[in-house]
Image (tube, helix red, strand yellow):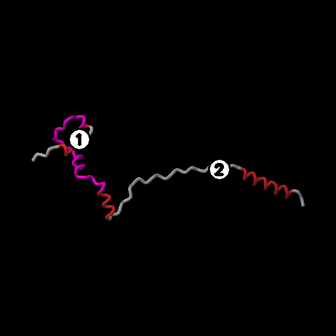
Amino acid sequence: RSAEAGRRFRAEVEGKLAKLEEPDKAPVVKALPKPDLTTKKRRGGRRIRRLKERFEETEMMKAANTRAFLHNAGEYGDDSMGMTLGMLDTKEEG
């Protein structure tokens, strides 16, 4: 038996210890996936129909959002800023 086997064994053990003493690799920060901003299609049913009715635009709001073109509004500033009542502000003559 020669000392060569012992030297090989020692070099192997020292190599393994050096490998264990190395600091851990920094974790790779992965970007999050792009969010899916589309709303999923809701199926029908009594509950969903009631929910939709709660957020539905009322007739009064529809009339307020409708613009009256032949009606002379009071002040130009309010009209240009959209601070009018739309068709609610007009008197329907008929």
Residue 69 location in percent, x, y? 18, 42
Depth check, mark 1 against mark 2: the one in front is 1
Q: Residue at x 85, y 57 (%)?
A: 6
Left or right: residue 82 versus residue 41 is: left
**Nearer the N terminus, badge 1 or badge 2?**
2
Q: Amino acid at mark 2?
A: Lys
Q: Are marks 1 and 2 in contact (CB under 8 Å)?
A: no
| Quadrant where the image shows the N terminus | bottom right
Q: Residue 8, image x and y in percent? A: 82, 56
Q: Assess whether residue 63 is covered by the magenta stretch.
A: yes
Q: Residue at x 59, y 50 (%)?
A: 28
Instruction: Identify which residue is drawn at 78% across, 53% down.
Output: 14
Q: Position of residue 15 (x, y in %)?
A: 76, 53
Image height of 44 relative to 28, above or below: below
Considering every residue shown, the one lying at the far left of the view is 94
Q: Which residue is mark 1?
A: 84
Residue stretch rendered in magenta on the structure: 54-79
Please tell me whether mark 2 sits on a helix, a strand or a loop: loop
What crowding class fits label 1: few (fewer than 14 Cα within 10 Å), some (14-19), or many (20 or more)?
some
Q: Quadrant of residue 48?
A: bottom left
Q: Within 10 angstroms of label 2, few (less than 14), some, or many (20 or more) residues?
A: few
Residue at label 2? 25
Disc 1 secondary structure class: loop
Tell whether 23 sits left or right of 60: right
Residue at position x 24%, y 37% from top?
78
Residue 22, given in percent of the width and then of the height, sits at 71, 49
The amino acid beneath tag 1 is Thr
Q: Is residue 89 magenta?
A: no
- 24 w.r.t. 73: above or below: below
What whole-number distance in Å separates the C-alpha atoms at marks 1 and 2? Answer: 64 Å
